Image: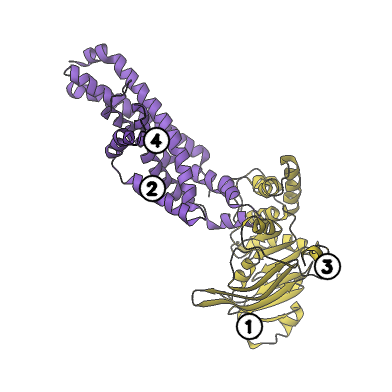
């Protein structure tokens, strides 16, 4: 099958796949960021057990293969009577993985904030939560735009895990499997999806660079 | 004690009683006792490693102590939590490295404390902040971020940030040590003004001329101990101990 024929027959599937990849990436990334902030707050909190829990979270989810985690979420959780829709299973998996990496990015962002600023904040009477809210989190966010841009790309690519479960609509990689089971698209069927990923990644890094220049903290 | 504290003029604003502190094997503060009266300007000098910065930082508990007592207007310094935060808000602190909040404008740096800790409205906080920035001479920089200012301007802004909390006392931890020589005086001038205005001040510094001109009392520290204290004239012209004489000789060249 040639390119024109593939797109003629399955164009709509690819388009739906691209939209599914985009929407899953967006939803996942929002939760990734929220969870990454929460986990990082736990890791820097004055409460030792909370710090331990935060570290454990990162160590577990940073070091587990995506497919293995997906299998646990999709096929082990139902044993505990937690049955999630397929799409949600994929998003949960991606969020757990992504937030562990996101928290590592945040930690490096926090490490760029001098201890002096924290002492100054304490000296004017700010409490731990006020310091987090006004000093630590804003600066950590603004100094980690570029690593978070990379993370968003990684999150998008991880949504390809969706090809391993029977989701509808399928995302870009799932579409390839679908196409190749009914036609002989071969490598070309993959390349169409690859182009979708690549163009999205380029757009993300372009926007990430622009955002970084706007919000970067001058030192 | 607590109820009489704020009104009684005889209670020292800051009092350290037999304070000891170790860093591992290093005994950084040895039985330090000290009191600072209302409106007094106390200058702490001594060789590096003498514990003078550490002593200054224990006063608002940026450094914890092993034993002894620290009283603010007769009340023991709280150990942690909201009580400690409240007490800190009443004591200004100026650092060697300025430590302005890098992502906020100068105006936001000065208004953050009043808005978050004192609950002032934005307008109220900004009005007073601009007055203070005017006073320290950096009002025209109010909408820039710290990295766009010179060291001297940053330090003056940092002083304004502390003053915005209307503190009972101000601590200065080597406020001019990180500055280029030509910027030292602009910061010292602000501090002289403050002293003349009756602010209670503890100043850790190497600026001997400032100590001579402004201090009510000079405390000389070495090896974590207060070795000698007295008026600037007594201390600089007639030091009582050999340690102080050696120290003063060693800096005479400057």
Same chain letter for marks 2 and 4: yes
How many other residues sit within 10 Å of disc 3, few (<14), some (14-19) or many (≥20)? few
Q: Disc 4 designates what residue?
A: A152
Same chain letter for marks 4 and 1: no
Shown colour of chain B: yellow
Q: Is residue A106 above or below residue A91?
A: below
Q: Nearer the viewer, mark 2 or mark 4?
A: 2
From the image, which quarter does the N terminus of chain A lie in?
top left
- Is residue A141 shown left or right of residue B124? left
Q: Is residue A24 above or below residue A183?
A: below
- Is residue A207 shown left or right of residue A167? right
Q: Disc 2 designates what residue?
A: A58
Which of the 4 quarters of the picture holds residue A69? top left
Q: Nearer the viewer, residue B24 or A219?
A: B24
Q: Disc 1 designates what residue?
A: B249
How many other residues sit within 10 Å of disc 1, few (<14), some (14-19) or many (≥20)? few
Which structural element holds mark 1? helix
Chain label for disc 2: A
């Amino acid at each position: 099958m040639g390119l024109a024929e593939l797109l003629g027959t399955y164009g709509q599937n690819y388009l739906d796949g691209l939209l599914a990849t985009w929407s899953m990436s967006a939803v996942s990334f929002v939760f990734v960021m929220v969870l990454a902030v929460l986990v990082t707050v736990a890791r820097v909190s004055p409460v030792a057990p909370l710090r331990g829990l935060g570290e454990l979270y990162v160590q577990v989810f940073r070091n587990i293969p995506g497919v293995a985690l997906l299998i646990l979420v999709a096929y082990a959780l139902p044993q505990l009577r937690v049955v999630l829709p397929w799409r949600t299973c994929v998003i949960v998996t991606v969020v757990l993985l992504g937030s562990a990496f996101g928290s590592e990015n945040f930690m490096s962002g926090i490490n760029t904030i001098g201890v002096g600023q924290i002492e100054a904040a304490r000296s004017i009477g700010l409490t731990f939560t006020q310091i987090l809210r006004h000093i630590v989190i804003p600066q950590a966010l603004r100094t980690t735009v570029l690593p978070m841009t990379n993370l968003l790309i990684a999150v998008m690519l991880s949504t390809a895990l969706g090809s391993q479960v029977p989701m509808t609509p399928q995302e870009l990689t799932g579409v390839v499997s679908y196409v190749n089971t009914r036609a002989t698209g071969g490598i070309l069927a993959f390349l169409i999806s690859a182009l979708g990923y690549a163009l999205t990644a380029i757009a993300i890094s372009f926007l990430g660079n622009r955002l970084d220049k706007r919000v970067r903290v001058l030192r | 004690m607590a109820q009489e504290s704020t009104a009684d003029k005889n209670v020292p604003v800051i009092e350290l009683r037999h304070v000891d502190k170790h860093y591992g094997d290093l005994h950084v503060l040895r039985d330090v006792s000290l009191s600072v009266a209302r409106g007094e300007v106390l200058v702490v000098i001594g060789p590096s490693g003498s514990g003078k910065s550490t002593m200054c930082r224990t006063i608002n508990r940026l450094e914890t102590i092993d034993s002894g007592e620290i009283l603010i207007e007769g009340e023991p310094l709280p150990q942690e939590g909201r009580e400690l935060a409240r007490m800190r808000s009443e004591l200004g602190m100026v650092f060697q490295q300025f430590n302005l909040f890098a992502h906020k404008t100068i105006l936001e740096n000065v208004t953050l404390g009043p808005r978050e800790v004192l609950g002032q409205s934005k307008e109220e906080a900004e009005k007073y902040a601009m007055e203070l920035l005017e006073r320290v001479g950096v009002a025209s920089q109010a909408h820039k971020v710290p990295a766009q200012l010179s060291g001297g301007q940053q330090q003056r802004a940092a002083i304004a940030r502390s003053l915005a909390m209307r503190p009972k006392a101000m601590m200065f931890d080597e406020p001019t040590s990180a500055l280029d020589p030509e910027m030292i005086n602009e910061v010292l001038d602000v501090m002289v003004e403050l002293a003349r205005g009756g602010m209670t001040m503890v100043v850790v510094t190497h600026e001997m001329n400032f100590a001579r001109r402004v201090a009510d009392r000079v405390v000389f520290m070495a090896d974590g101990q207060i070795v000698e204290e007295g008026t600037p004239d007594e201390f600089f012209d007639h030091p009582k101990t050999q340690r102080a004489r050696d120290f003063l000789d060693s800096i005479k060249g400057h």
